[in-house]
Image (cartoon, helix red, strand yellow):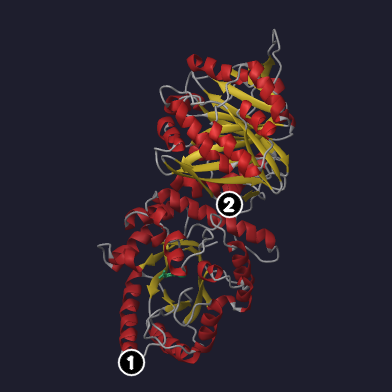
């Protein structure tokens, strides 16, 4: 698979862009004219730089306002093209992109445009180059690839072809299957971009909000299936205009870009088994069944606090690792591991010294743990391993969000018996009883807003998932954007990603003080929230106190019976309801740098996360940060 990316897609100066592009595994690069014009080097020097990095220059672009010009503009346009052909020769590329005319003086007419292209084809051939015509979604006369194709067909010149760009086709909701009738050898290059669905001006949407395939909402896989069906085997080239990306890290963007192309082509290969698609073999998207454990790293001195909090949530210590300072706490199907093995250079120790106490690792239950690592590695995720002691099993793992560790467990004998083989059971003198918590409902990871696309792509490319729409949560310190990912077909693994723009938000403060992205809360499921609340009270659990105003509003909003809302209020339970069911939430107070636990009950088929309650939760957490702490009753 030949992969390419336009220089506009990556931040930084030319040398930095090219280095990042090559390092991420691309074989080609599109030179965006503006990047070239603003960089102080000759075309030959730029050509050499690309080639020194092993990159082909797949395209020089864009050439604007060419076809359908009346005289005297027409003559000047041809002269302009001639000069660009000279530059292309020095750059060492043979393909130029001509985007459909947006000039108000341009004239329509398919035959007029075809005649212009035929003439340009002759000129291009004399320079040994080719031209490709791309329909901009906002072109004045041509805004649809089907019209662009008709012009190219009538131009009937070997040096003139069509350029397809997924954004222009899909943003206008043009059926990508219309591509299937174009001969593959007349498609000179294919540009790919995705975008979140916004109802806005096409030009503005395209120039500011494109993102990598798989990060947005456009059916890029369907588009590529149609392209593959034409027999096209040329480069797949990313062209991503995105303001946020321009401020990001060149290396991370290039890595995301490469991952997105491999992901899309792996999807296409599975959906079109009869078409030869040149993408590395890898296991299919991994169906995560659930979170098998979450592991905290902490120091012996801090451990007691975490242990005490877990105790009030009804967890008991049920095991100690045979060789290490690692303890296991369980309840229902939930396992929490506390690691204080900070001797030597363990990863847990390193994570603790950078972030303090944090949930630095979790384990996912999957069908085949080795397959999960294989797929993740094929998509560019780093694998993780640490030296094991005799008798210890190596659990397949990768590094993910914030360098946290993601372990994979399955039913193979070695992995399935790890808890009984490596941990010695703890005898509990007196059993205080649990709080009816059954499993981990979801994990919530907090990250910088600009890193969210990276991590959404990470999860959606490796796992079989669906994403819920992005919701905005208003924090008095700024906006926090939140999106949930759920495993399919079974929602056994649920994860919410919260992106904080400002360090003044509660989430942003967690990032700043914990020095980076990490799990900020863990939500446990119960099947009876009121029974759980009673048990928690007996265990001495202190819920996050919620303001009285919240309950008054809730009662009015849902028409709740006063007895019911009183019961909610008495136990500091938050409530939500939609057409499919009900949702109950209890929050713990925060621990360390803003970490907390949540307990939820889902009734019916409620599939959300209580987003409308988030501002109340945040307000309550902020109140507790104040010196007096307590809410006014
Ligand atoms: O926004 C533009 O002008 C523009 C230019 C070149 C392209 O290939 C494109 O897709 C858009
Ligand atoms: Mg384009």
Point out the residue furthest to the left here. Answer: 40
Percent coordinates x, y for residue 269 in the rendering: 65, 60
Rendering quadrant holding ligand 1: bottom left
Which residue is the site of mark 2? 469
Q: Tell me the element at label 2.
A: loop
Q: Which mark is residue 130?
A: none
Q: How many marks?
A: 2
Give SS at disc 1.
loop
Identified at 30% across, 86% down, the residue is: 76
Task: Tell me if residue 558 can be seen.
Answer: yes
Q: Residues within 10 Å of mark 2 (few under 14, many from 20)?
A: few
| Quarter of image, res 36 | bottom left
Q: Which residue is mark 1?
A: 71
Q: Position of residue 29 (x, y in %)?
A: 42, 63
Neighbor class of circle 1 (other Cα within 10 Å; few <14, some 14-19, many 20+) is few
Q: Report the front residue among 429 and 571.
A: 571
- Any part of residue 404 in sight: no
| Residue 355 placement (x, y as % from top left) | 44, 28
First in sequence, mark 1 or 2: give its number. 1
Of 183 and 431, nearer the camera is 431
> From what the image shows, is residue 303 above or below residue 3?
above
Q: Position of residue 2 (x, y in %)?
A: 52, 62
Which of the 4 image quadrants contains residue 295? top right
Q: Are marks 1 and 2 in contact (CB under 8 Å)?
A: no
470 on left or right of 208: right
* Residue at x-position 46% and y-position 59%: 209
Residue shown at 42% from the left, 64% from the top: 207
**Mark 2 close to ligand 1, CB under 8 Å:** no
Q: Is residue 497 left or right of residue 368?
A: left
Task: Give the residue at x 48% y 81%.
Answer: 142
């Amino acid at each position: 698979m030949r992969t390419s990316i336009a220089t506009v897609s990556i931040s930084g100066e030319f040398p930095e862009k090219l280095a990042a592009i090559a390092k991420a595994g691309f074989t080609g690069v599109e030179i965006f004219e503006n990047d070239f014009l603003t960089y102080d080097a000759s075309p030959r020097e730029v050509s050499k730089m690309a080639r020194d990095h092993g990159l082909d220059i797949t395209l020089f672009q864009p050439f604007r306002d060419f076809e359908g010009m009346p005289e005297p503009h027409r003559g000047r346009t041809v002269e302009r093209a001639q000069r660009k052909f000279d530059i292309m020769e020095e750059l060492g590329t043979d393909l130029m992109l001509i985007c459909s005319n947006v000039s108000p003086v341009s004239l329509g007419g398919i035959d007029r445009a075809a005649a212009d292209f035929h003439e340009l084809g002759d000129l291009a051939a004399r320079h040994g180059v080719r031209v490709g015509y791309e329909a901009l979604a906002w072109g004045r006369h041509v805004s649809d690839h089907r019209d662009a194709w008709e012009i190219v067909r009538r131009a009937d010149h070997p040096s003139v072809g069509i350029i397809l760009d997924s954004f222009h086709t899909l943003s206008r909701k043009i059926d990508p299957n219309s591509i299937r009738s174009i001969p593959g050898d007349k498609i000179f290059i294919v540009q790919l971009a995705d975008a979140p669905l916004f109802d806005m001006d096409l030009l503005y949407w395209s120039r500011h909000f494109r993102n990598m395939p798989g990060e947005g909402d456009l059916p890029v896989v369907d588009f590529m299936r149609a392209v593959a069906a034409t027999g096209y085997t040329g480069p797949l080239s990313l062209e991503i205009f995105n303001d946020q990306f321009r401020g990001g890290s060149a290396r991370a963007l290039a890595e995301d870009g490469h991952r997105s192309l491999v992901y899309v082509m792996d999807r296409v290969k599975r959906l079109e088994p009869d078409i030869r698609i040149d993408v590395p073999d890898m296991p299919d998207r991994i169906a995560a069944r659930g979170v098998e454990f979450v592991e905290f790293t902490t120091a012996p001195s801090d451990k007691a606090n975490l242990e005490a909090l877990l105790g009030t949530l009804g967890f008991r210590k049920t095991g100690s690792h045979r060789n290490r300072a690692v303890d296991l706490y369980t309840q229902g199907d939930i396992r929490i591991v506390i690691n204080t093995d900070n001797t030597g250079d363990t990863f847990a120790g390193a994570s603790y010294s950078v972030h303090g106490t944090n949930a630095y690792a979790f384990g996912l239950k999957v069908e085949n743990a080795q397959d999960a690592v294989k797929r993740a590695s094929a998509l560019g995720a780093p694998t993780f391993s640490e030296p094991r002691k005799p008798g210890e099993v190596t659990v397949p793992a990768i590094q993910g969000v914030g360098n946290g560790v993601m372990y994979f467990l399955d039913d193979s004998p070695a992995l399935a018996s790890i808890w009984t083989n490596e941990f010695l059971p703890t005898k509990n003198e007196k059993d205080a009883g649990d709080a009816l918590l059954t499993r981990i409902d979801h994990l919530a990871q907090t990250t910088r807003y600009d890193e969210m696309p990276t991590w959404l792509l990470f999860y959606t490319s490796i796992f079989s998932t669906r994403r819920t729409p992005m919701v905005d949560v208003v924090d008095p310190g700024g906006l926090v954007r939140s999106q949930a990912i759920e495993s399919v077909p079974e929602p056994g693994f649920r994860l919410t990603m919260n992106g904080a723009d400002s360090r003044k938000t509660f989430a942003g403060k967690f990032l700043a003080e914990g020095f980076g992205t990490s799990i900020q809360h863990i939500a446990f499921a119960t099947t009876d929230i009121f029974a759980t609340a009673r048990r928690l009270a007996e265990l001495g659990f202190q819920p996050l106190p919620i303001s009285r105003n919240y309950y008054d509003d809730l009662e009015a909003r849902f028409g709740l019976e006063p007895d019911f809302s009183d019961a909610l209020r008495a136990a500091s339970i938050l409530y939500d309801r939609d057409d499919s069911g009900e949702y109950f939430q209890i929050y713990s107070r925060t621990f360390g740098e803003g970490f907390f636990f949540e307990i939820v009950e889902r009734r019916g088929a409620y599939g959300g996360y209580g987003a409308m309650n988030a501002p109340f939760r945040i307000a309550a957490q902020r109140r507790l940060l104040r010196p007096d702490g307590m809410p006014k009753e």
